[in-house]
Image (cartoon, helix red, strand yellow):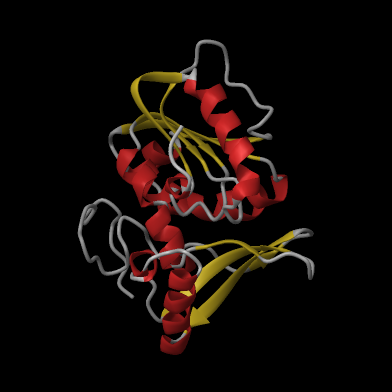
């Protein structure tokens, strides 16, 4: 897979590796903490075909999976038999996070660090002045953030502020408003998440600058508030 600069091909209909995203296996090394682990894994052609079928039959579309190709990927997992992957950089994840990358500008607020996949193209955008990331798990910050820094210029990295907090309880400093607000704190999206989504959209909707964009991961599945 060819790695491209995230801004070179933004908006392309059929990019090489779903730009503006970069393969996270080129950025994140496997590492294991007390509670979380970053793993590399590989998908064969058969795996990709099965993922596409599963995505369609679980209510998705083939479009969500069209950018998953055979190759190496990264996933963030919580250790323990009862937990599954929290995030990966496969095609569905990239496709369903594409809108926030395209909309990001000005002062950006992101809830949920994950693999830092969306930060790579967002911090590279000249239209983005500052990015605040709220992440509830301190170990995720420890595993991911130091590995991201070498990707960026000093100027790009200076835009980033990562805060260990719960977005449902955290409050921005007085009079702080945002031009882009994005919530991605759920490993999967289901009816159980609706109440939290609605609460976050109402609460942080008061922190928008005029013309600001606000969204939640896969909110299109249920509609926009």
Which image quadrant for residue 168? top right
Is residue 134 visible to the viewer in this orientation of the structure? Answer: no
Q: Nearer the viewer, residue 94 or 202?
A: 202
Placement of the N terminus among the 4 image quadrants: bottom left
Q: Nearer the viewer, residue 120 or 54?
A: 54
Callout count:
0
Q: Nearer the viewer, residue 109 or 47?
A: 47
Residue 143 position (above or below residue 176): below
Residue 202 location in percent, x, y? 54, 24
Is residue 14 visible to the viewer in this orientation of the structure? Answer: yes
Q: Could you tell whether 21 is left or right of 34 in the image?
A: left
Q: Could you tell whether 65 is left or right of 161 in the image?
A: left
- Residue at the (44%, 47%) spot, across then down: 119
- Residue at the (42%, 51%) spot, across then down: 97
Residue 143 location in percent, x, y? 64, 55
- Residue at the (37%, 61%) spot, across then down: 22
Which image quadrant for residue 96? bottom left
Residue 75 position (above or below residue 132): below
Q: Could you tell whether 60 is left or right of 140 in the image?
A: left
Residue 86 location in percent, x, y? 62, 59
Residue 93 location in percent, x, y? 46, 60
């Amino acid at each position: 897979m060819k790695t491209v600069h995230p801004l070179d091909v933004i908006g392309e209909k059929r990019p090489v590796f779903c730009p503006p995203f970069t393969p996270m296996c080129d950025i994140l090394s496997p590492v294991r903490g007390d509670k979380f682990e970053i793993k590399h894994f590989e998908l064969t052609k058969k795996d990709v075909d099965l993922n596409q079928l599963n995505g369609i039959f679980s209510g998705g579309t083939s479009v969500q999976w069209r950018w998953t190709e055979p190759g190496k990927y990264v996933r963030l997992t919580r250790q323990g038999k009862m937990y599954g992957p929290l995030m990966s950089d496969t095609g569905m994840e990239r496709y369903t996070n594409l809108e926030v990358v395209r909309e990001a500008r000005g002062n950006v607020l992101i809830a949920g660090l994950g693999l830092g996949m969306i930060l790579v193209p967002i911090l590279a955008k000249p239209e983005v002045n500052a990015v605040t990331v709220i992440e509830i798990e301190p170990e995720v910050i420890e595993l991911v953030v130091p590995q991201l820094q070498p990707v960026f210029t000093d100027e790009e990295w200076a835009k980033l502020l990562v805060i260990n907090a719960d977005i449902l309880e955290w409050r921005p400093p007085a009079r702080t408003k945002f031009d882009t607000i994005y919530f991605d704190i759920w490993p999967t999206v289901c009816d159980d998440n609706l109440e939290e989504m609605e609460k976050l959209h109402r609460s942080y909707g008061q922190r928008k600058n005029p013309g600001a964009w606000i969204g939640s991961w896969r909110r299109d599945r249920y509609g926009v508030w």
